[in-house]
Amino acid sequence: MSNLFSIFEPSTSMMSMPLNWISSMMVLMTIPSMYWMMNNRYNKMWHLPMKHLNKEFKILLKSKNNKSTTLIFVSLFMMIMINNLMGLFPYLFTSTSHLTMTLTMAIPLWMAFMMFGWTKNSEMMFMHMVPTGTPVILMPFMVCIESVSNIIRPGTLSVRLAANMIAGHLIMTLLGNTAMSMTMNILPVMLIIQTLLLMLETAVAIIQGYVFAVLSTLYASEVN
């Protein structure tokens, strides 16, 4: 079991060098900036989903004039999705399976939202503590519940992303280890299962990035 979790160990070395965390930057290092400026199919492949995400996040933020409002959330989705997909390749480190990575993204966003909300929209932040129609007797309890749910938001964002990445990779590792001791009759079935699981993990990698970005956008819309 200790060897099973070694794939999520940050200190695990590749080629006798601690290059694990650099794997999250491999995509940016292998794509020259000139390719992003040329009007080609690869560029359009990135711009189409970014435009759709920009429209959707603007609706969530209720922002019509400011074009740069959703840039941070679209960039956040792209970074998480790339790191999740890179973790599906052999011998590559999944950085988003660690709370070190996910908390680094969630906590600064949450702190920025809270600082902006309590300094600029203090009255509205107090209104969020007590939902409309709450009886007077339950108001103190609702304030405590809403405060706790607000404080644990960065933790839930981080744990959700890390747990989903760890769960899928562990299942793939377990199936890969058991395939070595199987007979040739069962091996094709195991190969089909592994292929389907890899397709599922690819979808989960994209969905988790989308969920992280959408929830961050909804948290931002509450304080704006």
Image: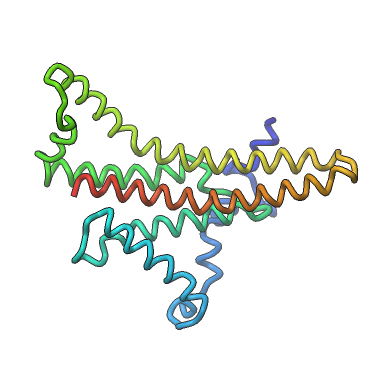
| 45 vs 223: above or below | below
Q: Which residue lies furthest to the front in this view?
A: 133
Side (left or right) of 31 relative to 155: right
156 vs 176, left or right, is left
Assign the N terminus to one quadrant of the image.
top right
Total numbered labels placed on residues in the image = 0
- Tell whether 142 sits left or right of 94: left
Can the viewer see residue 18? no
Residue 147 or 49: which is nearer the viewer? 49
Q: Which colour scheme is used?
A: rainbow
Quadrant of residue 39 in the image? Answer: bottom left
Whether residue 13 appears in this view of the structure is yes
Q: Residue furthest bottom?
A: 39
Give residue 171's quadrant in the image: top right
How far across and down, in percent of the image, does residue 54 sit?
A: 33, 63
Q: Residue 78, position in %: x, y?
A: 44, 59
- Residue drawn at point x = 75 percent, y = 43 percent: 176
Residue occupying the point 44% across, 44% down: 102
Residue nearest the observer in this picture, 25 or 122:
122
Furthest-left residue in this view: 123
Q: Which of 42 and 63 is in front in this view?
A: 63
Q: Residue at 55% across / 43% down in the picture?
A: 165
**Relative image position of residue 183 (x, y in whole percent):** 90, 41
Q: Is residue 114 above or below residue 53?
A: above
Instruction: List x then y, in percent, for residue 15.
Output: 69, 54
Q: Which residue is drawn at 43% across and 40% down?
A: 158
Residue lying furthest right: 184
